[in-house]
Amino acid sequence: MKRLLPVLAIGILTLAGCANTAPYSGNVYSGNQAKSAQTVTFGTITALRQVQIQADSRAGGLLGSGGGAVIGGLLGNQVGGGSGRQLATVAGAIGGAVAGTKVEESTNRITAWEMEIRQDNGRNVVVVQKADQNFQVGQRVRLIGSGSSVSVAPY
């Protein structure tokens, strides 16, 4: 059992980082956006700052907390004997669940741009998207889409 613990820990932590961050990119379209007309407006970036997007976990946080609890419980079970061992197992499971949740949250964060854009019609909008392209203040851009589904692309 002790030999399997490191393998189990690595497997769980690897799966904890399986958030799907592709939808936050300006270069990725969802299935319902393909073959549909998108509105295009033009503008200039007036402010730009790097931010973080907390991506949702595909497993709803169960991998981090559940995996951490299992690993913590197994580690706690190695301590002491009798009722002390039971307490250590419970404490290890609780601590592992908390630690696993934190690890999963940190692996599901992605770097993004918060871009304030002055559109040619005079309106200012802010769009946040994955930082997989370089943008600069003063750069002309296209805003593709509308409402809650807008991506920014270089012009």
Image (spheres, grey):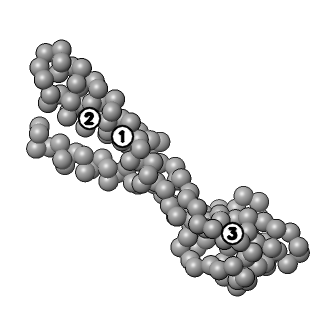
The disc at residue 51 is none
Q: Secondary structure at mark 2?
A: helix
Residue 80, relative to residue 116: is it above or below?
Answer: above
Look at 45% across and 48% down and name the residue there.
105
Look at 22% across and 24% down and name the residue there.
88
Give how far apart the Cα atoms at labels 3 and 2 are: 42 Å
* Image quarter hosting the C terminus: bottom right
**Left or right: where 119 falls relative to 127:** right
Measured from the top left, where is residue 20 in percent x and y?
48, 57
- The residue wearing badge 3 is 115
Task: Please state which of residues 91 and 21 is positioned toward the viewer in this rendering.
Answer: 91
Measured from the top left, where is residue 120 in percent x and y?
85, 78
Look at 15% across and 28% down and name the residue there.
79
- The residue wearing badge 1 is 99
Give how far apart the Cα atoms at labels 2 and 1 are: 9 Å
**Left or right: where 27 falls relative to 70:** right
Q: Earlier in the sequence, mark 3 or mark 2?
A: 2
- The residue wearing badge 2 is 72
Point out the residue furthest to the right here: 121
The answer to the question of whether label 2 and label 1 lie on touching residues, with beta carbons closer than 8 A, is: yes
Any part of residue 90 in sight: yes
Q: Secondary structure at mark 3?
A: strand
Look at 80% across and 73% down and name the residue there.
118
Crowding at dot 3, Cα within 10 Å, few <14 / some 14-19 / many 20+, comes out as many
Residue 67, relative to residue 139: is it above or below?
Answer: above
The answer to the question of whether label 3 and label 2 lie on touching residues, with beta carbons closer than 8 A, is: no
**Number of numbered callouts drawn:** 3
Q: Amino acid at mark 1?
A: Ala
Task: Please state which of residues 57 and 90 is positioned toward the viewer in this rendering.
Answer: 90
Residue 14, relative to residue 134: is it above or below?
Answer: above
